[in-house]
Image: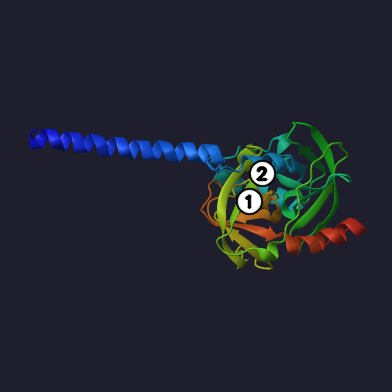
Amino acid sequence: MSRQTGKRIVDLVRRTAIGSAVLAGVGACALNGTFEAPSAMPTLAPMLERVLPGVVSIAASGQFSAEEMALIRDPEFRAMLGLPKRMGPEEGRFLVQGSGIVIDALSGSILTTRHLVDGADEITVTLKDARSLPGRIVGTDAAGDIAVIQVEARDLAAVPLGNSDDLRVGDFVVAIGNPFGLAQTATLGIVSGLGARNPTEPDGSFIQTDASINPGNSGGALVTLRGELVGVNDSLIGSSVSNSGIGFAIPIARANRSIDRLLRRNVTRP
């Protein structure tokens, strides 16, 4: 027998032995129940299926103030924005869109930001199932930029409250809202900073995140991967038409102080 033939025989025996050992191992695992199939790909879908029904779209409209109307009528201002020289009848009213969070399904209480509904005389809330409902302002807190509105509806789903005090920089969070009118949009990011000062609202401390917060997200939910509400999406730094990677949310621990007072008294706090 030549050396080459002998090598082929040795290789064949080796491969057969290895294959037999692998098959024997798999068979033994199957017999004793320890064989594990490949784990499923990680997904946030189950959590979002629970949370999304509790995040709503809000449209708020109202009359411009006298000061705002004076600016809108100013010819130079209109020319700068490319507006017609003469005002149309619809220009006396504003319409803004944002988001809200159902915090009490039984009472129909919805948490949002004050700046979204400030000055509005008509509020429309649209649920995930496409129902549109009139909303009324229960109370607002200007210092906290918090507002509570209320709707009359059955089968609402509230978002479970979490504890923003437990957050750490680096924790994953999901921002949910209505950016650019795209309802029920969810974006994933991390907590980038805690106790951050928002340059546009220097009176309070915020959760800083790189989860995309765009125009229309204001008033939406910032939740943990467990689906617990830890923040109210508030604003972003940079262009008003695109996300810059720096967004801010009001910690739910801070918002809760306003919520409790507003629900008890139904008041507007300057």
Q: In which quarter of the image is residue 132?
A: top right
Residue 106 horizontal/vertical position (percent): 88, 44
Place residue 200 in its image quadrant: bottom right
Mark found first going from the N terminus, 1 or 2: 2
- Residue identified by numbered label 2: 47
Q: Position of residue 90 (x, y in %)?
A: 72, 36
Give the percent coordinates (x, y) of residue 206: 65, 63
- Comparing 230 with 74, the one in front is 230
Quick check: can you spot residue 149? yes
Q: Which of 214 and 174 is in front in this view?
A: 174
Circle 2 Cα neighbour tier, 10 Å, few/some/many (<14 / 14–19 / ≥20): some
Proximity of marks 1 and 2: CB atoms separated by less than 8 Å: yes
Q: How crowded is mark 1: few (under 14 residues within 10 Å), some or many (20 or more)?
A: some
Residue at image point 57% right, 44% down: 81
Question: In this figure, which residue is indicated by the disc labeled 1?
Answer: 225
Three-letter residue code for mark 1:
Leu
Q: Which residue is drawn at 28% across and 37% down?
A: 15
Identify the mark at residue 29; answer none if there is no mark: none
At numbered mark 2, what does the secondary structure look like: helix, strand or loop? helix
**Image position of 209 (left or right of 67):** left
User: Residue pushed farthest front?
Assistant: 1
Instruction: Give whichever of 235, 162 is nearer the camera.
Output: 162
Q: Looking at the picture, which amino acid does disc 2 mark? A: Met
Q: Residue at x 88, y 39 (%)?
A: 152
Asked if residue 50 is positioned above or below residue 234 in the image, the reply reads above
Residue 158 at what x, y percent from top left? 79, 46
205 above or below 62?
Answer: below
Q: Reply above or below: 222 against 169.
A: above
Quadrant location of the N terminus? top left
